Each structure stands twice: as structure tokens, then as C-alpha cells.
Amino acid sequence: METKLLSVSQIDEAAEIIKRGGLVAMPTETVYGLAADALNGRAVADIFRAKGRPMDNPLIVHISELSQIKCLVREFPEKARILAERFWPGPLTIILPKSELIPDEVSAGLDTVAVRFPSNETARKLISASCPLAAPSANLSGSPSPTTAKHVMDDMSGRIDAVIDGGECAVGVESTVITLASEPPRLLRPGGITLEQLRDAIGEVVLDDAVMNPLKSGEQAASPGMKYKHYSPKADIILLKGKSEAFVRYVNSHNDGKTAALCYDSETEKLEVPFISIGKEDDYSEQANRLFAALRTADDRDFQVVYAHCPKPEGIGLAVYNRIIRAAGFEVKELEE
Ligand code: TXA
Ligand code: MG
């Protein structure tokens, strides 16, 4: 199949593809999503085939008006109302008990459904012109989420019907995922809405253990996506924790020719190896915005070992930490002062 590259003015054509049961990659404010009609189980099954995604990993349903959630969930508790009022439209996904309308392909056999109301205008227009859309990130399973239409094409060309080119994604990491299907609410994946913001809105929110740590063998993941190896570039990513001087010193003394550094702007001048900066050390939003493109660049340039400076796990930095620690297989090397 030939994958069409559509512009943001071709929403109607994209909506027709969706209504016929096809697959369209769309921009959102977080990352590009691979969308299909959420209520069409056969179309949703094609998403899994196109991505090479394990069938037991459920999908997020995207809406463009709050009223659409009513037929997707069995309950809409007070805490969901508060979160929706504060953070929707925006980069927050809320998990609730699912209604009977949700096909098994979407919920992967669970009794819950993840719902998100994106703020990206193109995504909202596409949903309004078609229907609620099931959409995982539009990458091949296991590679970094796409933040440009080119990233989507690099992974998906020939495998899906169309890509809408909406430019670069504003946030750059996937949405925050919180479950309200059990008490107390639990943060399953950090993202653009921070743990602090969630607690400020609804009080107690538990940080799921899988956000910072690998699953222990035999342990069930609250969010199935957490158990899969993610964001794994071809190079070995080695995470180094410590001050800038120690990071630079360590990297410069471990240069074997195919080595690169994933670093902050302030470190680039002192590094003696090729580098990819993810921005300013204290600007977590910028780091989130640049991380996935940086991992893809490391792949394109065929580095074998990438030394990455470990971000601080606070605010949006927690999302950066959560993604990079997966890319590094959960190994962090503490540097001496
Ligand atoms: O920002 C985003 O959320 C992007 C854009 C496209 O909206 N989407 C995205 O989808 O990141 P995906 O499929 O790559 O990640 C969804 C995550 C997975 O870890 C999945 O396991 C989890 O959400 N998830 C989905 N439904 C769930 C459910 N009912 N219970 C627990 N976890 C769920
Ligand atoms: Mg994904």
C-alpha cells in the first residue's frame, strides 16, 4: 500500500479513510498517533498489525468533546470530572471502567478504557469529522515515539493509509496516564501533566512502581505497556548520574570512536566526542520536546554507545527520566564527584 502524505487542510480526506476502516497517522500535542475508528474492532486490529504491537497492550481512545466520553465509560466519577475540567483538552489520559461499546481489541481484554481529549487542533478536527479514535503512538513497536511526520513515514511508510503532516509536536513525550479505575488514583505513566499538578487537583495520587523501576519477574503490570522494552535505539544507551564536570570527564575518557554523548547545551563545548544535546539542563519541557528526535538521530548516525546524562526525576523531568531509563534498560551508573 502507498502511504499518502496529507496536509492539515485535507482533514476530510483523512476522515473518509477512517470511516472506511483505514489507518491515519495524526499529529497530537504529545506525539503522532496512529488512528482508527475506536468502535471498529477490525480497523483497530489493523493498528496492531501495522505497528507490530503485542495484542495484550491496550489503546487510548481520543475524543474531541467531553460529551463523547459518556458512551465509552460505565462511570464518570467526581475526580474524573475535576481532572477533565482542569487538564482537558491536553496531555492527560484517564483510565475508567469501560462501556460495552468498547471492542476487546481496544481494551486488550481489560475491563477498563483509557480516554484522552487532545488539544491539538488537527487531531480534534479529525475526530469531529469522523468519530472517537483509538490511537497508540505512530511508531513501530519498540522504537521511539514519532514527533514529526517524517519520523512516522520512516517507520510506517507502506504500512498505513495516510499521514497528516502537522509539523513538530509541542510536548514531545506521550501523555500522562492516570487510572481512576481503582482507589487511590495511580499514575501509570508520567507526561506533560505532572504528578504535582494531579495531586493539586485531586489530592492523593500514587506513583506506580513501574514508572521508575523495572518490573520484577512474575509481577503484573498495571499498565501493560510498561512491561515491554521501549524506546530502544540500536546503540547501547548508558545513563550516567552526576554533575556536569563528572559526566564530561567520564565520557571523554571512554571515547572508542563509535561513541556519542546525549547531553545538555552547557556541556557541548567541553565534550570531545560527537554529541546530541536535548537542551538546557534546567528546562525539562525542552528536554521532553527533544528527547525522541535525539534518540532517532543517534540511530541514524550509527553510534554504538551513547552516554546519556541522567535527568532529574521531577516535574516534566520525571517523564524524560521514565523514557530514558527504559531506553537504557534501567541501568544507571553513579559517577564519583
Ligand atoms: O500521548 C499519548 O498518549 C499518545 C498520543 C498518540 O495520544 N498515545 C500513546 O499511546 O502514547 P500508546 O499506545 O503508545 O501508549 C498507551 C499506554 C500504554 O502503555 C498502554 O499499556 C496504556 O497506555 N494503557 C492503555 N489503555 C490502558 C488500560 N485500560 N489500562 C492500563 N493501561 C492502559
Ligand atoms: Mg507508544
Image (tube, helix red, strand yellow):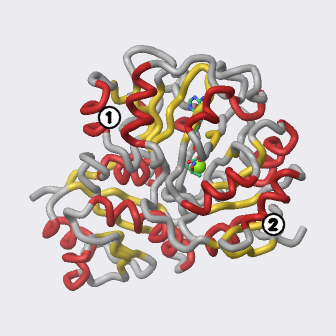
Instruction: Return the residue at label 2.
Output: 13
Above or below, 181 against 321 in this view is above
Instruction: Return the residue at label 1.
Output: 198
How crowded pointer 2 is (Cα within 10 Å; few <14, some 14-19, many 20+) is rated as few
Q: Is residue 325 left or right of residue 94?
A: left
- At mark 1, the secondary structure is helix
Question: Could you tell me the amino acid type at mark 1?
Answer: Leu
- At mark 2, the secondary structure is helix
Above or below, 233 against 299 in this view is above
Residue 77 on image: x %, y %: 47, 18
Quarter of the rendering occupied by the N terminus: bottom right
Whether residue 210 is visible to the viewer of this picture, yes or no, is yes
What residue is shown at x 43% (from left), y 51% (from top)? 323
Nearest the camera: 238 or 281? 281
* Tag shown at residue 218: none
What residue is shown at x 53% (from left), y 66% (from top)? 147
Above or below, 301 against 169 in this view is below
Q: Is residue 58 left or right of residue 260?
A: right
What residue is shown at x 28% (from left), y 59% (from top)? 284
Above or below, 243 against 261 in this view is above
Nearest the camera: 149 or 96? 96
Q: Earlier in the sequence, mark 2 or mark 1?
A: 2
- Given contact means CB atoms under 8 Å apart, are the residues at marks 2 and 1 in contact? no
What residue is shown at x 24% (from left), y 46% (from top)? 314
